[in-house]
Amino acid sequence: MEARPLRLRLPIPARSPAQPLRRFTPSPSPPASSTATSPPPRTRKSRKRPCQPSGPRQAHIRARNRSPSPVTTSGATIYYTTNGSTPTTASTKDAGPVAISTTTTLKAIATAPNLANSAVASGLYTIQTGTTIVATPKFSPVPGTYTGYQYVSMSTTTPGATIYYTTNATTPTTSSPKYVGAIIVHVSSTLKAFATAPNMINSAVATGVYTIQ
């Protein structure tokens, strides 16, 4: 008989459920050498903003923050008064320098075709002659706090002097009310007065504050 080779079948052991599958994990790369030079961090350049904008906006801001300069209007006509009144186009037309020999309040306006009239310019010119000063006026009763209205009189020791006064704290001029008798102060007021006399220097301005409760 012919001999046949013997074939053996070995059993394959079953995988235990407690044994997990193994996965391939690549080994970590070696750490970089401490001597390696890293590139410097990139920095963002900041743009410097100008302190003031340029161009038309800069000119606009400068013009807004700067006081306006005087402007001369060609072809304008000036009208003026010398008595403290407000000038109109019926007032004296300017034709040259104005001679002022006594204390004067000069007011003037300018007009031009197709333009609105200018604001009124005002100037007080005090002409003093002589060397003697008029005595400063005094108030009676003395300034202070009172209950109820008061009759306030004014006087100066200079004979023939004329007193001018205001009751709204403005500086009096010869265009202010002339004192002719006691005035009634029924609300809190600041009185100011000065005196004039021919061939004498005007007095200092007296001030009196009256508080009415």
Image: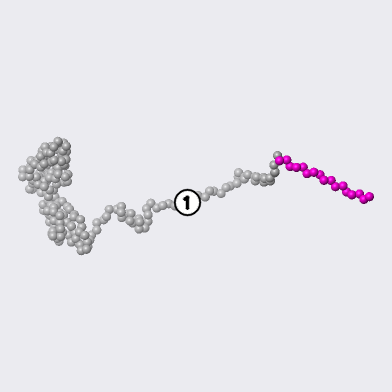
Q: Residue furthest right?
A: 1
Query: Residue sitting at 17 percent across and 44 percent down?
Result: 169
Q: Amino acid at mark 1?
A: Lys
Query: Residue sitting at 19 percent across and 60 percent down?
Result: 111
Decide whether residue 192 is among the magenta residues.
Answer: no
Across and down, in percent, residue 45 comes to 47, 51
Q: Is residue 114 above or below residue 6?
A: below
Residue closest to the eye, 150 or 192: 150
Count neighbours of disc 1 (C-alpha within 10 A) and say few if under 14, some if 14 to 19, many if 20 or more: few
- Find the magenta span and give its range: 1-17
Magenta region's main secondary structure?
A: loop
User: Which residue is identified by label 1?
Assistant: 45
Residue closest to the eye, 31 or 5: 5
Across and down, in percent, residue 98 comes to 13, 57
Whether residue 111 sits left or right of residue 55 in the image: it is left
**Colour scheme shown:** one colour
Query: Residue sitting at 67 percent across and 46 percent down?
Result: 26
**Quarter of the figure with residue 155:** top left
Decide whether residue 5 is among the magenta residues.
Answer: yes
Q: Is residue 35 above or below residue 107?
A: above
